[in-house]
Each structure stands twice: as C-alpha cells, then as structure tokens.
Image (spheres, coloured by chain):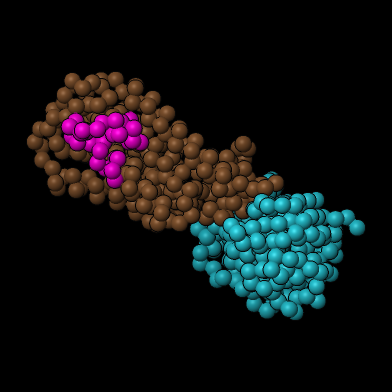
Amino acid sequence: MRLRYITAAWRMSVRELLRSRIALILFLVIPALFFAVILLTTTHKEIGFKLASVSEDAFIRVSQRREALVFIGLAAVGLLTSFLALNLTQKHAAANRRLVLCGYTTSELLAAKFLTLAGLIVGIGVYLSSLLLLFFRPGRLLLVFLGFILAGFVYGSYGLMVGALFRRELEGILFIVLLANIDIGWLQNPIYYADAQNKFIIRHLPAYFPSQVSMTAAFSGHSVLAPLWGGLVYGSLLLLAAALVFGWKMRIRK
Amino acid sequence: MVTVVDVRNVAKSFGRKRILKDVSFSVCRGEMAGIVGENGSGKTTLLKTIVGLLAPAAGEVIVQEKVGYCPQEMLVFDTLTVDENFAYFAAAYGLRQASGPGGWRGRESLLLSRFGFAAYRDSLVSNLSGGTRQKLNLSLALLHEPGLLILDEPYSGFDWETYLHFWDFAEELKAAGKSFLVVSHFLHDRSRFDTVYELREGVLRCA
C-alpha cells in the first residue's frame, strides 16, 4: 500500500462526503431527533435489567429515561455509520473501478474509505456523547463513548460490505435497515434482552458487544474488557469481509 | 511494425449468450484502428476485455503499451469538481509532479483548452452538461500521455466543433506515434481509420 495514493483518495473521499447535503443533515438531525423522541416518551421511573456480558445475577435498577438515552445513542451511531459507509463503497463504484484500472489498488481505495469512515465515527461519537451530557452524566463517560465508537466500527464495516456487495441503493438500504432495526434498534435493549427466550441469537448479532460496553460503563462499575475485545474482533471480521467483497467487485485482469 | 495490442482467439459469453466468438486482431504502433458494428454487437465487451475489466472465456490479450481507456459510460466523480477529478486520476496514474515542466497540471490545462471546457475547471461535475462531462471522461484517459488509446464512442454528446477538435487532436497524437483503437457507430468516421473492423454477431471481420 502506498501512503501517497491513500492520502489522495482519502482527501477526495472527505470532500465528497462534505458535499453530500443529505449526509450532513442525517449527521446533525438523526441524533437530536432520536434523543427528542426519548425525552418525549419516557419518564424517570426506575426499571431493572440484567447486564448480559457481566453476570446473570448482575441486576441493575436505573431511570428508564437514562437507559433509553444510552440505548438510542447506540442505535443512532449504528444507523448513521452504516448508511454513510454504504454510501462510501456503493456510490461511484464504477468510477472507483476505473481508478483501479488506472493504477490504484483496491486495498488503497478501501483504506482511504475506512479512514474517512473512522473520522466520521469519532465525529458522531463525540456529538452523541455531548448530547447525552445535556441530560445526564453516565458513570464512565469515556467508556460509554468507546461503546459508541465500537458500534460505529461494527456497523460501519457492515455498511462498507453491503455497499460493496449491492449495486443498487434500494437493496443496500434494505439490508441495513433490516439488521439495524432488529439488532441495535430492538434486541440489544437490555430491557428486552433480560427476559428474551433465545439469548444465543442476540449475543451473536453485531451490536451485542458495543451495547454491552456502553450499558455496562454507564450504569455499573464492572469491567468492559471482554465486550470491548469481542466488539473489536466482530468489527474486524466484518471489515475483512468488506475488503474481500470490495476486492472481488473491483478486480481487474492485468 | 511494432504490435501494441494483440488479441488472439478471444471468446466471451454472458450466460448462454455468446458475445465474442474467436476474435483475433492486432493494432500496430501509430495505427488508428476502428471497430464498428450495430448496437449490442459486442464492441464495448471487446474493449472491456482488452483493458481488463472483463476476463475472456477463451483466448488471450497482450497489451504492450501504457493504456488510456475512455469508457462509454461517464465514469467520473460527480460530487467533485473537474479539477479534483483530474487530481484524483493523476494520483491513480502515479503522476507525482503537479506543476512545472512535464507536470500533470500543464497536461490538464492543455486538455481543458483543447476540448474547450477550461471555464468549468472549478465546477462540480454534477452541474455540467452531458457533453462537457464527456469531455472530462475523455480527458481523464489522456492525462498520463498513454501510448495506446482505447476509446469507446469518445465523442458521444460532443457538439460538431468539439468533435472536429477531437479528431485534430487525435491526428496530432497519431503523428507523434500514439496508437488508437476506437469504437464508433458513425459511418463518416470510417475514412479516418487506417484499419476498420466490423463486429457482427460476435464475429470480427476486417471491413
């Protein structure tokens, strides 16, 4: 991989993203909208749930609103990063292939796109953590933020893979919405999880580890090391899958 | 004569449909070769196979020169400006030096002026007309001064004046020893080619 090539592609990728009005609107509006819905629909009534990655006995009682704010924060990161990552690999796919024909390698292009995505994930994570602070201060804010970053990494990698796989936007969006809605938007909510009949499926969905990091850090003093590693491995596997699909789609017969 | 492209017994199918059947031909240095044929006859598939975008089912393609490929579709970045597209492709070609003698900026200026779209240098591609986008699409293939130009209907959408400018420029490049393989469906283009091949139902014949 040649650094000069990656830097040039990264610069262009960032410019493209900054010129996308819909991306900027989504970036600013979605988190605020999600938090507003939580504020309008929840109360401070106490609710109890178990932390799946800690112990079946670790029962925690917290404000319904606070739990929902962290949960919806994770959902916002997952949805936003996967949509924006989809855009990075799907849009201009044919022009990207022309770049490969002209001398880029697929790994250089993907590295540039991932760098753009990484910046985006940090931006969304910082924005969401700042919004969260307006309503309450979680126990370990930095680790909650880390959970947001991890959700962005896992779902961003998934978005890159889906974008590389499907040529048309509709299929890509459908695949993202289906998974994100079921996983990060529903099953990973500890309130649902606590009494779920089949926890095996939930534990193997992409948002399991990131949501455990944020929830555990926000409402307990337990270690988040295990879900942190789990999330990193999960995200790396999805990124590897994205790299393979992207490489296959961009292949050139030399 | 030095052969710059040698296509030997190339076949290509999509599913059960055979697009190219045992296609063989070659292009020599300084030659202007044209491929004509009806819509769907396999011209674009043949060019894509030569440049490496498609793999042949049989046969082989040997290319001995640095290739400049202008695809039929406008494969440019429409959320970037014209100048940024040039910079992106210059990076892809590995052109290090931007300014100064021999730098790609000079080449960019030349192409912008030869095809008459210098005024759009800082415009977003999404705001350009189809013809101007095609000028960019073609210019990106010429940026790195390739020895072999493989052009798939390079002047579709051009006005008459730009079309004539294109051929003037092509003649200059040919005189400088560059080789061309051009797909065209214009009958009046035939006189401009040294060799004309006709592709019909996947079979290539010298017309």
Residue B30 visible in the displayed image: yes
Residue A184 location, quadrant: top left
Question: Would you say residue B163 sits in the magenta stretch?
Answer: no
Task: Decide if residue A91 is on the left or right side of residue B113.
Answer: left
Indicate the position of residue B89 as horizontal and vertical percent values: 63, 52
Indicate the position of residue B134 as horizontal and vertical percent values: 62, 67
Q: Is residue A226 above or below residue B34?
A: above
Q: Colour of chain B?
A: cyan
Residue drawn 8% across the image and 36% down it: A45
Magenta segment, principal secondary structure?
helix
Q: Which chain is brown?
A: A
Residue B145 visible in the displayed image: no
Please identify the residue farthest to the front as the structure is shown. Answer: B16
Residue closer to the observer: B24 or A67: B24
For the image shown, how many numbered marks are present on the structure?
Answer: 0
Looking at the rendered image, the quarter that the N terminus of chain A falls into is: top right
Indicate the position of residue B150 as horizontal and vertical percent values: 72, 60
Residue closer to the observer: B140 or A204: A204
Question: Would you say residue A186 sits in the magenta stretch?
Answer: yes
Residue closer to the observer: A241 or B111: A241
Residue drawn 41% across the image and 48% down it: A84
Question: Which residues, given as a range, are shown in magenta?
Answer: A181-210
Indicate the position of residue B57 as horizontal and vertical percent values: 68, 52
Task: Decide if residue B190 is on the left or right side of residue A83.
Answer: right
Residue A221 location, quadrant: top left
Residue drawn 61% across the image and 51% down it: A99
Q: Is residue A179 above or below residue B39?
A: above
Q: Is residue B133 above or below residue A70?
A: below
Residue drawn 37% across the image and 27% down it: A230
